[in-house]
Image (cartoon, rainbow, N blue to C red):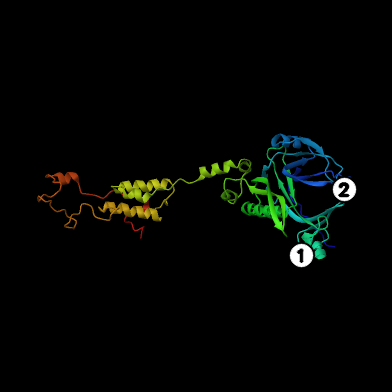
Amino acid sequence: MGSRIMTMKRQGAELGRIRTGYSTPHADPKKRPQAQRSATFILSSHSREYVERAATLYGGSAEEWTPQGSKISQFRVITEAHELRAILPPGDPLSQDNELWTGGGCARRCDGITEKLSRRPCLCLAEHGESWHEQPAGSVCKPTSRLNVMLADLPDFGVWRLETHSYYAADAMAGGIDAVLAATDGKSPMPLRMWIEQREVKRRGKTKRFPVVMVVPAIPSLRHALSGPLSMAAALDPGTIERLAIEAAPAERPDYLADARECRTSAEVREVWHRANRAGHVARDGSDELSLDLMRIAEDIGNGIDPTTGEVGDQDEHGGGELGPDDDGVYDVEVLGEGDQDAAGPQTAQPATSWPAAAQPGSGARR
């Protein structure tokens, strides 16, 4: 006899329900209560404290209430809130099925292919064909979406279950939640905005109006929602996401080459390289492209070449490396007296010890 392994879905304790409708007694006591749509959210719970706190936060009056088909009283508040801020917990908080409920409970639960309770192919499809969804309510399954969210401003740690039977809400909700789960891998919470949006469609010449619960990430931009897992602190205060992004944004990178071309000596170019090194913009051994470019500029300056034009400095129209006379036949040179040459010592190049050992100008590292 084979064994059957049951997998349990991990989730927080259910503290209450978020609803978008309620029922009122029918004028004929023999008939079922009439369903009413609400323009605002309704919160219900077995805990009076939760409902009273919700009434304080979102408006409305807490009242004792008995759900249809139940003998156990609860508490509910028809709030004045058209929008709720919530947190999507880690994991997979959304479940969607086609379900048929009767007085005896859930009679069918189907994913559109297999009816899960009987493990048979879709019963509605077998009974009514492709147009099964057009059958009267109560005779076939209807789409049922359940989303667990946390309401951070209400007491205790747990989830509130939002349930909707709207096909359009199910479609929109699944797309948004799946995108978030793909970005976070289900490993982090995500702040949400939920609101009731009125829609209408035309079918066979008739206009149908209905509410749709919209659920979207409550973050400064879509980029933040899709950039990976968030901390619980960020989920509680979405504004921190933008602040952290601004703080973490890298400073604008200086144009080191432009700075180097403004230098007058090789030593000044070396200082530009050291500035880039301290900022982590060049390799410490000077093997990167920016370091090599800076060394070329330093070497050009050392050879008397203007790095902005590529011309040899102080050249006149006669060309060559020697200076010619001016219009009066005067050579612009410094005249050294006897013994001055020895005092001045031989001309030497700028020391290059400040460059990395593997990146001395002229060392061949740039080839």
Q: Earlier in the sequence, mark 1 or mark 2?
A: 2
Amino acid at circle 1: Glu
Amino acid at circle 2: Lys
Tag nearer the camera, 1 or 2: 2
Q: Is residue 12 left or right of residue 251?
A: right
| Residue at 72% over, 58% down | 205
| Residue at 17% over, 56% down | 317
Picture coordinates of residue 287, whole percent (x, y): 40, 55
Picture coordinates of residue 303, whole percent (x, y): 26, 53
Picture coordinates of residue 241, whole percent (x, y): 57, 43
Residue receiving disc 2? 31
Residue receiving disc 1? 130
Picture quadrant of residue 149: top right
Q: Is residue 317 left or right of residue 307?
A: left
Quarter of the image with the C terminus in it: bottom left
Toward the left, the furthest residue is 328
Residue sitting nearer the eye, 156 or 355: 156
| Helix, strand or loop at mark 2 | loop
Q: CA distance from mark 1 to mark 2?
A: 31 Å
| Helix, strand or loop at mark 1 | helix
Quarter of the image with the N terminus in it: bottom right
Mark number displayed over residue 116: none
- Crowdedness near tag 2: few (<14), some (14–19) or many (≥20) residues, C-alpha within 10 Å: few
Q: Is residue 61 above or below residue 336?
A: above
- Crowdedness near tag 1: few (<14), some (14–19) or many (≥20) residues, C-alpha within 10 Å: few
| Residue at 50% over, 46% down | 249
